[in-house]
Amino acid sequence: MGIEKENGATILHRATEYQPPRSWRTWLIGRPLPTADAPHQTIGKAVGLAVFASDALSSTAYATQEILIILAAAGTMAFGYVFPISVAIVVLLAIVAISYEQTIHAYPGGGGAYIVARDNLGELPAQTAGAALLTDYILTVAVSVSSGVAQLTSAFPELFAYRVPIAVVLVLFVMLINLRGVKESGAIFAIPTYFFMGMMFLTVGVGLFRHVTGTLGTVVGPPPLEVAAAQAITPFLILHAFSSGTAALTGVEAISNGIPAFKEPRSRNAGITLIWMAAILGSLFLGISLLAGPIGAVPSEAETVISQLARTVYGDQGLLYLGVIAATTVILIMAANTSFADFPRLSALLAGDGFLPRQLAYRGSRLVYSRGIMALALIACVLIVAFGASVTALIPLYAIGVFLSFTLSQAGMARRWWKIGHLSPGQQVQERGSVLRREARWQLKMVINGLGSACTLVVMLVFAGTKFVDGAWIVLLLMPILVAIFSYIHHHYQRLARQLSLDDYGAPPRLARHRVILPIGGVHRGTLAALQYARSLSDDVTAVHVALDAAEAERIQRKWETWGEGVRLVVLDSPYRLMLEPLLEYIEEVAAHRQPNETMTIVVPQFVPGRWWNSLLHTQTATWLRLALLFKPGIVVTDVSYQVD
């Protein structure tokens, strides 16, 4: 249907009937989905818990062990501090969860810390939050998969030497599943997530019952306690252990970032899922920490605390033990799924605001941000290889980013409530991520978010101080570098927009002259096809031949006199047998003497074999010439293909 505008232009709209054909990609990731299917790809609370909470829930598999590793420096007597430290961490979890529940309802469009900081704190804090979250998501994949492999090697020690390739393969597997779409990946990962929760609640429940009845016992044949030199129990040691245990809070923000993936009412469903996650996480974490002391669990790379707990609770390494190991291994691998769900969404938001390459903002064939998914997998694999899939080596890098994002998010929310408190009754203010309107009890909400920000800031400072020499300095250095990269990309897009803007542009300049240069390597049918096209553009056409051989140049001149239709031919002698350099020098010389409003077009003839592999038999001079001229300003490059069998 055509619509004619006042200026005489006609705009046509037509629907394409083209459908992508079936291919190997269809078999691998599924058939392409139309944009109209996007509302049907949303998920409910049950699947949402599996997709967005697996990261947080999986941290129960290693958080207690990380506390024990630090306390082990003071000997087994210090292990009695595990449970009090865990209680303090769960209190912090409750504060953060309540704060993020408010964020979910305030920003139903998702985006989490980045959107909140952008709307309330400014561009630099928003970039910092984005860098912190992206870093955390990458480390989540590396840590969770490495921890899952550690569970596997605890049950099967002969696999320990192959932990790195196993971890890389598992990351690629999770990437592949996520490329199939949020709804499908959620359905696939829901069963393992609920299986893990069932096995862990069963193990903790049986363990607590046996502890109360006095039948629990201790770990049989525990791994040796590896302590370089005994230290005193100091406040620094306790803070160090506390900071390691706060890894249990990673992933709490994931639901607030992924609100658009939930079914309507999105905020309500996301908020309920967040409360479920916090309750399950707190219960399991406290239960495991409580039982670690009575059974005499010992932190070790050779056997995890979960493995020691399971074989002590069940008395052997039978079916239930293997079920716990299998469930823990799978949930730790599934924890990477949370990052694969949130990293691409956050990357798309940053790309949409011009802080990352625009390509990351485009959805793939399955309505997910495919480029972000693949980028996350690649970077995580590099980290796993670099750190040997060691959880202990990766943990010091972990959690700083997430606590920085916690701090900025809650500070932004406190600022938001302050702005709301200064609105008149009935007044509304539209911001980029939400609508501000007067709300009751805004003072209480501001206090809650302010308290959350203060607590997470203290934890972040403790973490940075206690883990600095262990590797935290890498993340503290990396985040400013990421922010600088964001700023560079943003300035590039802004500069490009200014240069392309039509504001104050006026009328397009008329072309005073159109000069065409036609490079030729010989005189044949492809050359004549390119010549016809060049003459259709302009009467000012110059053919150029680079002469590497005098006899061949003479033959080309004679043929051009017959077939060149009177077009002038410039022969460039090349004594050093260079092809591109003399031609580029000639083009630059001509371009330097262009008149104002003169256009210069290089028409490159190229013959294309019918079979792609036959292209390997030719020099591809046209391709190299096109690439060399691509970045020459003010020059139009076009090629005329001549198909041959």
Image (spheres, rainbow, N blue to C red):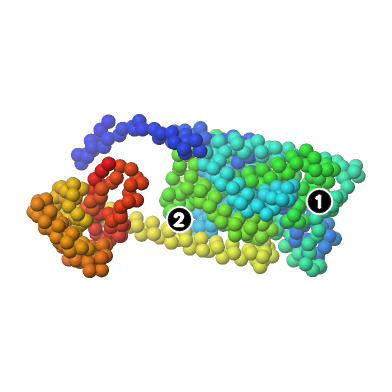
Q: Is residue 101 above or below residue 388?
A: above
Question: Which of 264 and 570 lies nearest the eye of the viewer?
Answer: 570
Which residue is identified by label 1? 292
Q: Is residue 11 left or right of residue 239?
A: left
Q: Residues within 10 Å of mark 2 (few under 14, many from 20)?
A: many
Residue 36 visible in the snapshot: yes
Marking on residue 355: 2
Quarter of the image where the C terminus is located: top left
Residue 411 visible in this rendered orientation of the protein: no
**Which kind of residue does numbered mark 1 sit on?**
Ala
Which mark lies nearer to you, 1 or 2?
A: 1
Point 69% across, 53% down: residue: 160
> Identity of the amino acid at label 2?
Phe
User: Image point 58% across, 44% down: which residue?
Assistant: 174
Instruction: Classify mark 2: helix, strand or loop.
Output: loop
Quarter of the image where one finds residue 601:
bottom left
- The residue that appears at 66% across and 38% down in the rendered structure is 192
* Pointer 1 or 2: first along the chain: 1
Residue 391: % across, % down: 67, 56
Q: Position of residue 340 (x, y in %)?
A: 56, 46
Does residue 208 lie above or below 84 as drawn? Answer: above
Name the image quarter holding the N terminus: top left
Left or right: where 28 falls relative to 641:
right
Closer-to-camera residue (37/126): 37
Residue drawn at the location 27% of the way across and 35% of the way down:
12
